[in-house]
Amino acid sequence: MENSRIENRFIELVNVLRRLRSPDGCLWDRQQKKEDIGRYLLDESYEVLDAVASGGSEDLKEELGDLLFQILFLAQIAEESGEFGIADVLEEVTAKMIRRHPHVFGNREVGSVADIRANWEEIKKNEEKKYEHHESLLDKIPRSMPGLMRAQKITALASKVGFDWTEAQDVIAKIEEELDELKAAIRTGDQEHITEETGDLFFSLVNLCRFFSMDAEQTLQRTILKFNARFYHIEKKLKERGKTPADASLEEMDKLWNEAKTASKE
């Protein structure tokens, strides 16, 4: 019964999308190109992540629907241009998941999660050989990927072939070196040089995250949440005094910031 419901709702959504793209559909939807949907896809992906972080099931349900629609929209555009169809996408991902789980759909035996991950990487590597067209190992990482994520994946790939630090202290020394170079750039006042050295420092910090098995994006997001919580405290306390942050002095806001910081550690 549930499978039938899934099938019916999926077909209904595809038909809605095709109607929107039809000559008697929606002018705005007909004008959308792959590049447009790509941007919306990224936006919706972030909204899904926000819904996951907030823990709201209704929000997550809605955002997953929006994301699914953008995925289908891209596939529909490809189908209209004769590249591939929605069915092709479904067939390919289904076959891939079956192929990459031989311990479930085949006869391969595993004894741990580590075995499963090793199988996955081995199968993925063999698949990539069939479609290999990259001039560099690093070309496998999409250029449109957000900077922190891309930096972490690039350094992880480099590490797999032995291009990596052996000790944590070496990574920290590199961060200190980049910080000194940034300070020197700031003293020159050369904006281009400052930008370059700031990027180098960011990259080294991402490397530190990877070295200690931390996700750089999630690590930064945690700090952003912490900043937000403390700034909300500032806003709340100032509101109680009939003020806004624009009305308060830096000294007053700094005092409230430290108050929030102390409270969060209790």
Image (cartoon, rainbow, N blue to C red):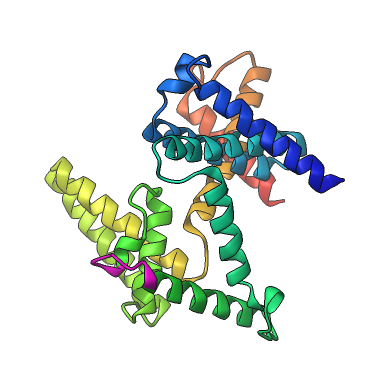
- Residue 264 % position (x, y): 67, 46
Q: Is residue 158 left or right of residue 10?
A: left
Q: How far across and how far down the image is residue 36, in percent?
A: 40, 30
Q: Position of residue 61 (x, y in %)?
A: 72, 37
Classify residue 68 by image quadrant.
top right
Residue 136 shown in magenta: yes
Q: Residue furthest right?
A: 1
> 23 above or below 76?
above
The total of numbered circles placed on residues is 0
Q: Position of residue 107 (x, y in %)?
A: 68, 84
Q: Is residue 70 above or below residue 124?
A: above
Quadrant of the frame with the N terminus: top right
- The chief SS type of the magenta part is loop
Question: In percent of the image, x 50 and y 71: which residue is there?
Answer: 212
* 154 is higher (above) or lower (below) than 79: below
Quick check: 68 left or right of 132?
A: right
The front one of 170 and 164 is: 164
Q: Is residue 32 above or below residue 192?
A: above
Give the residue displayed 39% in from the left and 30% down from the top.
Answer: 33
Q: Nearer the viewer, residue 188 or 7?
A: 7
Q: Residue at x 44, y 75 (%)?
A: 125
Residue 134 can be seen, yes or no? yes
**Does the rendering let one see residue 56?**
no
Highlighted magenta segment, given as a residue range = 130-137
Q: Residue at x 65, y 25 (%)?
A: 236
The answer to which of 134 and 246 lies nearer the viewer is: 134
The answer to whether residue 240 is magenta is no
